Image: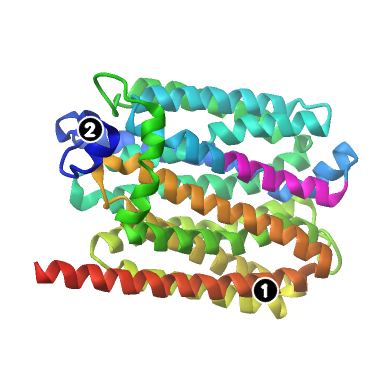
Amino acid sequence: MSVAQQHDRPHDQPQGDDPGTRPDGGARRATIWLFAGVAGATASTNYYNQPLVDSIARGFGVSDSAAATSVTVAQVCYSLGLLLIVPSGDLLRRRRLATVLLALVALGLVAQGFAPTYPAFLAGLVLTAFGAVTSQVLVAFSASLAPPGRRAGTVGTVMSGMLLGILLGRSVAGLLSELGGWQTVYRVAAVLAVLALLGVRALAPEGGHEGPTPRYLAVLRSMPPLLVRYPRLVSRTLMGGLTFAGASAVFATMSLHLSRDPFDLSDGVIGLIGLVGVAGAVAATPVGRGVDRGWDRWLGLATISSLGLAWVLFSTWGATSIVVFVVAMVLLDLGLQGTHVANQGVIQSLDDAARARITSLYMTGYFLGATLGSAIGVAAWDAGGWTGICVAGFVLLVLAYAAWGLDTVLATRERRAASAH
């Protein structure tokens, strides 16, 4: 049976998703918490360079714009990994896939931690970024281990770990830069990647496909029709991509903004500012539970509005006041992560048999938005400094509201169609 034919039978599940293969009780909870920790450790590797852009530029003797481009390179490679690697979760044993990717992460981190030149650093960054899609493999894996009525909450738990890892990664990168040089964080992270690999091998169930190996290209060809079959996958991907684009414009340039007058902050202090986003990570599990209760549309409106308030503060008092800037960062992270978790809760319930491919499509759009946003951020910074960043942010915010409106229309149509039947 072809992949397309399998998809036309939505009630069929891959054997690895059979409820009988799910760990029970404490074993399942331990596995989910393991996934949360590993997702945090791997996803954070794409963000270490954000508070270190200024130090990377000075360390390798390149321009600020060239160093900031490393943020874009990481996101491009991560996006390609989402598109080309994550769908394999519908084909392969997921534990094996995760361990191979973690090995790639460890290798890339070693290369970054000991790179003698900027091109060598970028080469290691490419390897790390491709391997870091482990986090999204584990998101889909965790959804397959949860009962249907608790999937969004379970995904929210893994997402909380991933988001906390990202936030702590930014802060730890800045602090380790102060203690032992900016490359120290990559050396420490390489050790953590090896420990994560060992943990997954020891505790995670196999999961995923069993039986004859399907055709990889057939799986890739089956992905575009999912966008037609599930319109809310499109609307939620647009919401996620546009909100992440606006946030990435800030992430790619905040170290340039805060290291200059009137702030003049060090790498360590800039990294600590990332800790204020813990509010967004802590909100992930409650948002996931809210999606399980059917509140996804209104949660989306609330979280995008949080982003709107953040941009108001960034463009006014936040341009010169560190206190207001920090408040704006809290609202930015809360809005970004809340929107993302709500989106994940919706898409993970669309089709059990295509969960990894749906995750791949959504996350590819999500990080393409991040790539676009970081590129826009660098261009806006060169053109108009922080004012240019804020103008770009407001444009992306308006587009995100439009995507939420589209999703609301689609959700209403689905509800009416279900009532008619």
Which quadrant is home to the C terminus?
bottom left
**Residue at the left extreme?**
421
Residue to which mark 1 is pinned: 314
Vertical relation: 11 (above or below) 217: below
Q: Which of marks 2 and 1 is nearer the N terminus?
A: 2
The stretch drawn in magenta includes residue 73: yes
Where's residue 97, x and y in %?
Answer: 42, 25
Residue to which mark 2 is pinned: 14
Magenta span covers which residues?
Answer: 63-78
Mark 1, Cα crowd under 10 Å, few <14 / some 14-19 / many 20+, is: many
- Tell me the SS state at disc 2: loop
Rendered residue at 40%/47% (across/down)? 224
- Count of numbered badges drawn on the protein: 2
Marker disc for residue 353: none
- Is there any visible trace of residue 420 in the rendered image? yes
Occupied quadrant, residue 88: top left
The answer to whether residue 340 is left or right of residue 169 is left
Rendered residue at 37%/53% (across/down)? 227
Q: How is the image coloured?
A: rainbow
- Is there any visible trace of residue 273 in the rendered image? no
